[in-house]
Amino acid sequence: MKKFSLLLFSAFVAFSISAQEVQNVSQGTVYLKNKASDNWYIGLGGGTNLYMTKGENDADASFGDRLGWMGQLEIGRWNSPNWGGRLVIDGGHIKHVAAGIDPEQNWLGGHVDVMYNIINAWGSYDPERVYSLIPYLGIGYMYGLDADWKKPNPDGDLFKNQNQTLTYNVGLINNFQLSSNVALFLELGWRVMQESFDGSGLGGDFEYDSMFTGTAGVKFGLGGKQDFTPAELMDYNLINDLNSQINRLRAENEELRLRPESCPECPEVQTVEAAETVYVPNVVFFRINSSTIDKGQQISVYNTAEYLKANENAKVNIVAYADRQTGTPEYNFALSERRARAVADALTSEYGISSDRISIDWKGDTEQPYAENDWNRVAIFFVE
């Protein structure tokens, strides 16, 4: 028994470590690591259990007579869209056990589990998804008590050292997300424990009883961020395009540097000051499925705000888009609206530009301003 328990515990630790090593990748998408305080939740539930004994030890009892009650409190954290862990503290009433044993017993215990979100891992991550199917695997401990929640017959040989056991737990969690911080769950579990736990007492190594459990309840986010942000790598086509522009400007500057500083034969050039600053259209590029303005894109918002401050009669129209190869047309239309509003809000809240001078429009993926698909996750400033 001890060797088998040690083997399973070692396998559980190895499984947990391997889960941590791949925690930030889902379907080829890399996700940013959240803060240690993010993605925590607490859950409270209750339900029923069915204790199963073996062979001749199993007393004659109907299915309804075997059902006992149970409750559980859990606290957990999702380390990535695919992998998470939790600690469950539970307890309850066993209504029927082996023949010849007090048919009603109680227990307290707990288990530590690794959770795996199949929907995210095998499909795609969607923070607004309602239903998720989550298998779990874990190891735990149970301590048996009598019907009065006391240690059963502590001085008797039959129960001595037989009312506690390691447990090996597997199950399925059906999760129904109501909002970013509230979810309902329906959990079906199965745990295996030493056969002598119920007091039948004579089972040797590798002799086990088991318990089926069914619980339902509610989970609450414990503050902090509850979703995950994809870490989209820099678009190398965009980098190459920008480098080409830089190299062209460098070549022009070098050519100007080689020209003579004065030209006696050239007519005198009359200098005329411009009435207003020349505006060069700015763009804000977004990551996939995001309406958050990255730090590297803030300069475009700043430049437009500075132009508007210097030209008090100027107005700006912000038009946002989404790329055609990602998402449905309906989703992309709503996403482009969020992008347009995010840029407009940055102009008003961060730079004090009056909302009367800002208009917005959004096209979804009905229009694609750039030939390169990824560039169309964009909002473009048009000064009027």
Image (tube, grey):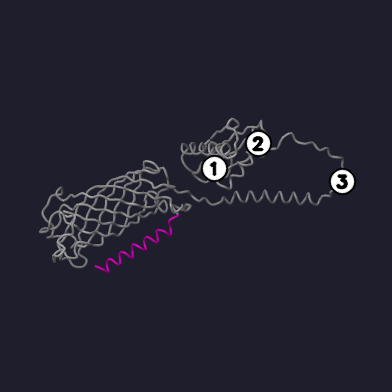
Percent coordinates x, y for residue 235 in the rendering: 57, 50
Q: Tell me where residue 340 sits by quadrant.
A: top right
* 58 on left or right of 332: left
Residue contact between numbered discs 2 and 3, judged by CB atoms under 8 Å: no
Residue 159 coordinates in the image, percent (x, y): 16, 63
SS at mark 3?
Answer: loop
Tag 3: amino acid: Cys
- How many C-alpha atoms fall within 10 Å of the one at disc 1: few (<14), some, or many (≥20)? many
| Label located before the other in sequence (1 or 3) | 3
Earlier-in-chain disc, 2 versus 1: 2
- The front one of 58 and 89 is 89
Mark 2 falls on what kind of element?
helix
50 in magenta: no
Give the Cα distance between marks 2 and 3.
Answer: 39 Å
Number of the front mark, 2 or 1: 2
98 to the left or right of 176: left
Q: What segment carries the magenta color?
A: 1-24
Nearest the camera: 277 or 144?
A: 144
Q: Position of residue 322 (x, y in %)?
A: 52, 40
Q: How far apart are marks 2 and 1 (CA)?
A: 27 Å
Magenta stretch secondary structure, dominant? helix
Asked whether, in this view, residue 1 is left or right of residue 243, the answer is left
The C terminus: image quadrant: top right
| Residue 298 in the image, given as x and y percentages of width and height | 59, 44
Mark 3 lies on residue: 263
Q: What residue would you read off at disc 2?
A: 309
Indicate yes or no whether the magenta region holds residue 13: yes
Q: Residue at horizontal 68%, vertical 50%?
A: 246
